[in-house]
Amino acid sequence: MHKNLLLIFTRNPELGKVKTRLAKTVGPKTALEIYTFLLEKTRLEASTVNADKAVYYSVKIRENDCWDATIFEKHQQKGNDLGERMQNAFEKGFKDGYKNIIIIGSDLYDLSSKAIDTAFSDLDTHDAVIGPAEDGGYYLLGLKKLHTSVFRDKEWGTSSVEKETLNNLKAYHVKRLEIKNDIDVYEDITSIPEIMNRFILDKN
């Protein structure tokens, strides 16, 4: 067993149920195609990270999908909101004996395996690591012990999440990573030529 654990929270890729804000502009079919592309990119980057890996499904565990069960443990998210689901995943990881745990989502275009490995290294010298997103949330959170306050009393999906999380951790030594942009609305993809060329311009 590795001392590091990477948690990947993912939504099951189903038409009309992923990237709903993006779908308002590009339509549900294209939104699903873009999400599936981001999912595959996340899988490729995560597969080479120097850690054990676990993917947590939003709705249902899929056995024969892009997540290779010999590389990724597969689990179902459990809890009433995102905070509770993340807390339960961290709690399981620490109970299983992991020392450093990082969680990421599956909708960030420019999160590399190198950046995740660096975040794990940062946890060797910090109590926590956070990767702030441009929208005020975060794309990565790393802990070396369970801090339940970071998972509670948040309005998930709003611009206050990262600020409130940092406030929860103000007594600790926190490494703040570079700001990145996760993909939620059409404006988030206009600066990414690979996505625009493949999924938007090709259809016009």
Image: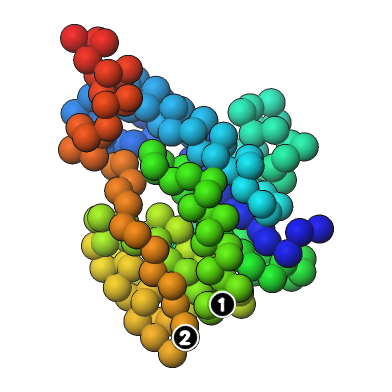
Residue at the right extreme of this rendering: 1
What residue is pinned by disc 1?
Answer: 125
Nearer to me, 78 or 183: 183
Q: Measured from the top left, where is residue 95 in percent x and y?
A: 74, 70
Residue at the bottom extreme of this rendering: 171
Q: Residue at x 74, y 36 (%)?
A: 69
Nearer to me, 197 or 162: 197
Above or below 150: residue 46: above
Could you tell me the amino acid type at mark 1? Thr
Q: Measured from the top left, where is residue 117 in percent x and y?
A: 57, 55
| Horizontal side of residue 149 vs 20, given as left or right | right
| Horizontal side of residue 42 vs 194, given as left or right | right
The disc placed on residue 168 is none
Q: Is disc 1 surrounded by few (<14), some (14 to 19) or many (20+) residues within 10 Å?
A: few
Q: Is disc 2 surrounded by few (<14), some (14 to 19) or many (20+) residues within 10 Å?
A: few
Question: SS at mark 1?
Answer: loop
> Where's the N terminus, which quadrant?
bottom right
Task: Say whether residue 76 is visible.
Answer: no
Q: Measured from the top left, where is residue 65 in percent x and y?
A: 63, 27
Above or below 54: residue 194: above
Above or below 82: residue 129: below
- Mark-to-mark CA distance, 2 and 1: 11 Å
Could you tell me the amino acid type at mark 2? Tyr
| Horizontal side of residue 188 vs 105, given as left or right | left
> Where's the C terminus, which quadrant?
top left
- Nearer-N-terminus badge (2/1): 1
What residue is pinned by disc 2?
Answer: 172
